[in-house]
Image (cartoon, coloured by chain):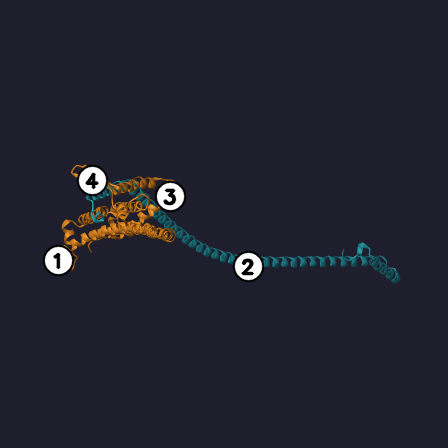
């Protein structure tokens, strides 16, 4: 088996079936399943955890609470100001949804739904819509577009800067999409490559593969897996943080 | 491998659909009770802090009042003490004066008493002497036979006096 085939098998989505829903042809695939599992875990787990009074669950309850309070005080609050309370549920859900999908990819037999450009693209699209809608709601449609170009710019630059700002909005969200996607598959590719090393060296010499390469590769894989665990939290935070910054900038242009 | 960068639009739809559904449901079921609990706690903490601050201010006010009362009390005690001391001195002087006066009076009365007693005794003595003289004269007159008898008589009388006949004894 070639490395390419292995990577394709582990990283790409596997569409099992298509079904039609009105005009839409929707796939049912491995990543859809993982996404649904992550969503169900959040949908059932979070309300149960938050409303439970069990002292055994108290540490987990306060973990969720600490994260939400951190998002409120450090991420959403400084950017959205007095609108924080209204938008906090969106950002909390965004963070926990991405985190749950990232972590689902680290579980055996799991797959990383966020390691799919369609999934991260969908999330980035919601951010794109959010920042435009929130900006228009805050300043009005005309005010929003007139504030797209920063103040103090000579008027003859407007025709040049307006399309650039529009383009900037697209690239910002596109970068969000690619950043999450690349970070999530990067770790997996490294892990798969390291494990493949064992078999490459094992093909040359069985003793070399098992005795020398295997322990080193397994240790390295362990390290990369821990790194991936960290990256899972980090990327969820970065996506949420950048979304908050973009939304804040769209709402308050000054 | 180009499938890696070829987004499946159905999957994108799923993502957006599931995410929006999650936002809508979790807002109601998870974040609302969580934020409610957090805000209740924060409110409670703020309320407690305010109450503590108020209580502290009140205690300070009470302490201030107490201190002022103590100071006033101290001044009053001082004044009362001084007053009492002055009154005591006055009283003592008065009593001393009184005692001195009454002692003088007592001495005066004793003196007059003594004087009158003395006078009475002198008078009595005079009477007694006169009586004795008359008695002696009587005896002399009864026995004027001879000088010898007279002398004898007088001597006898004097002896009688010396032996302590109570009848003629001087004084008591």
Instruction: Determine the CA span between mark 2 and mark 4.
Output: 121 Å
Tell me if residue B101 comes above or below residue B44 in the rendering: below
Which is more foreground, mark 1 or mark 4?
Answer: 4
Q: Residues within 10 Å of mark 1 (few under 14, many from 20)?
A: few
Which is more foreground, mark 3 or mark 4?
Answer: 4
The answer to which of marks 3 and 4 sits earlier in the sequence is 4
Q: Is residue B139 left or right of residue A176?
A: right
Q: Is residue B61 left or right of residue A234?
A: right
Which is more foreground, mark 2 or mark 4?
Answer: 4
Please name the color used to draw chain A.
orange
| Residue A230 image label | none
Tell me if residue B123 comes above or below residue A114 in the rendering: below
Q: Nearer the viewer, residue B95 or B85?
A: B85
- Name the residue carrying label 1: A160
The secondary element bearing badge 2 is classed as: helix
x and y percentages locating residue A162 in the rendered image: 14, 55
- Name the residue carrying label 2: B93
- The chain ID associated with circle 4 is A
x and y percentages locating residue B139 in the rendered image: 83, 57
Seen at 41% across and 54% down, the residue is B64
Q: Are circles 2 and 4 on residues that touch, CB within 8 Å?
A: no
Q: Residues within 10 Å of mark 3 (few under 14, many from 20)?
A: some
| Residue A58 image label | 3
- The chain ID associated with circle 1 is A
Visible residue check, residue A246: yes
Q: Nearer the viewer, residue B79 or A190?
A: A190
- The answer to whether dots 2 and 4 both sit on one chain is no
Instruction: Determine the CA span between mark 2 and mark 3.
Output: 86 Å
């Amino acid at each position: 088996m070639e490395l390419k085939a292995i990577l394709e098998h582990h990283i790409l989505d596997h569409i099992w079936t298509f079904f039609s829903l009105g005009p839409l042809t929707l796939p049912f695939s491995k990543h859809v399943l993982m996404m649904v599992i992550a969503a169900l875990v959040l949908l059932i787990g979070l309300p149960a955890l938050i409303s439970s009074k069990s002292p055994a669950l108290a540490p987990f309850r306060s973990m969720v609470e600490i994260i939400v309070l951190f998002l409120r005080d450090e991420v959403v609050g400084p950017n959205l100001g007095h609108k924080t309370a209204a938008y906090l549920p969106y950002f909390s859900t965004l963070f926990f949804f991405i985190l749950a999908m990232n972590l689902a990819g680290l579980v055996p037999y799991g797959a990383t739904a966020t390691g799919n450009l369609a999934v991260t693209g969908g999330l980035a699209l919601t951010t794109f819509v959010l920042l435009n809608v929130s900006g228009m709601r805050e300043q009005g449609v005309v005010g929003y577009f007139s504030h797209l170009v920063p103040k103090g710019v000579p008027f003859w630059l407007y025709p040049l800067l307006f399309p650039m700002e529009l383009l900037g909005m697209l690239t910002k969200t596109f970068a969000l999409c690619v950043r999450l996607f690349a970070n999530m598959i990067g770790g997996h590719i490294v892990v798969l490559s390291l494990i493949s090393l064992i078999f490459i060296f094992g093909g040359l010499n069985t003793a070399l593969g098992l005795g020398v390469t295997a322990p080193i590769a397994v240790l390295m894989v362990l390290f990369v897996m821990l790194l991936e665990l960290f990256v899972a939290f980090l990327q969820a935070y970065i996506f949420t943080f950048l979304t908050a910054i973009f939304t804040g900038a769209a709402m308050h242009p000054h | 491998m180009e499938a890696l960068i070829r987004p499946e639009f159905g999957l994108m739809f799923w993502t957006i659909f599931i995410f929006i559904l999650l936002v809508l449901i979790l807002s109601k079921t998870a974040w609302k009770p969580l934020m409610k609990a957090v805000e209740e706690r924060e409110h409670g903490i703020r309320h407690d802090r305010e109450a503590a601050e108020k209580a502290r201010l009140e205690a300070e006010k009470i302490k201030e009042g107490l201190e002022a009362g103590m100071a006033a009390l101290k001044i009053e005690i001082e004044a009362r003490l001084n007053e009492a001391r002055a009154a005591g001195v006055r009283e003592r002087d008065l009593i001393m004066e009184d005692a001195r006066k009454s002692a003088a009076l007592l001495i005066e009365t004793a003196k007059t008493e003594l004087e009158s007693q003395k006078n009475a005794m002198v008078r009595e003595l005079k009477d007694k002497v006169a009586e004795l003289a008359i008695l002696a004269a009587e005896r002399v007159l009864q026995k004027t036979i001879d000088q010898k008898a007279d002398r004898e008589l007088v001597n006898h009388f004097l002896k009688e006096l010396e032996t302590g006949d109570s009848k003629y004894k001087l004084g008591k």
